[in-house]
Image: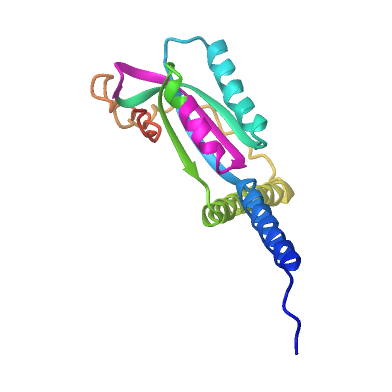
Amino acid sequence: MSAEPSFAMIDRLAVQSCTAKMEVLYTEENVLRTYETLYIIHPDVTEDDVQAMSNKVESLVTEAGGEIVKSEIWGKRRLAYEVRTCREGYYVLLRFSAPETFIETLDSHFRLADQVIRYLLIHMDENALRLEASQKKRKEAEIRNSVAAARSRAGQSGGAPASAPAAAPAETPAAAPAPSAEIAPESEQPAPEAEQPVAEAAEQD
């Protein structure tokens, strides 16, 4: 007949179970996920201020135990429509890895920053990252193939034997050049296409 478990054993098992649950929760909270944010800064600030604000956001990421993946300041660009009386703004793109709990901190920072007129914050899941990597590899392969084809054509043209120069013809009056299609005056030439606006970020509340 098996002995009944003692209260000490039950307490020990309960403590071990609670400890295991706490370790799982701690691990889940500290898993780094990949995020990307695009935020727009008021156009009236200086470029030094834009750099300082970008550095501040990066510091928030690293202080929370995250890592910077990519940081780009795109400069001042025109908005598709007016946002908080602004038609332009400084675009800043930041991709980073951080715990999920950090997102609330970053969201609060953007909401309280008076100079941030708009921002978008998204989670880059595994499917999105794999698709991006695949597109990057395909683009790199296309560039390599294009360069190789250009080199091949250059080699073929360079290896062909040079033909002997033709005898100089007798001097004759130069023929008038054939008439070409008339160039439309500047007023009739089509205007160059306007630069497409950058994809808009979600508007700040």
Q: Is residue 93 magenta?
A: yes
Can you say whether 111 is above or below 21 in the image?
above
Q: Quadrant of residue 119?
A: top left
- Percent across and percent down for residue 45 are 47, 10
**Residue positioned most to the bottom:** 1
Q: Is residue 39 left or right of residue 22?
A: left
Quadrant containing the N terminus in the rendered view: bottom right
Q: Quadrant of residue 198?
A: top left
**Residue positioned most to the left:** 188
Can you say whether 3 is above or below 69 in the image?
below
Q: Is residue 36 magenta?
A: no
**Front residue (pair 169, 90):** 90
Q: Residue at 66% x, 31% y: name it.
A: 62
**Residue 173 in sight:** no
Quadrant containing the C terminus in the rendered view: top left
Residues drawn in magenta: 82-109
**Front residue (pair 144, 47):** 47
Render colour scheme: rainbow
- Percent across and percent down for residue 25 are 62, 52
**Residue 4 in sight:** yes
Q: Is residue 101 left or right of residue 66?
A: left
- Percent across and percent down for residue 181 are 30, 32
Q: Residue at 58% x, 45% y: name it.
A: 34
Tally of numbered discs = 0
Can you say whether 130 is above or below 166 in the image?
below
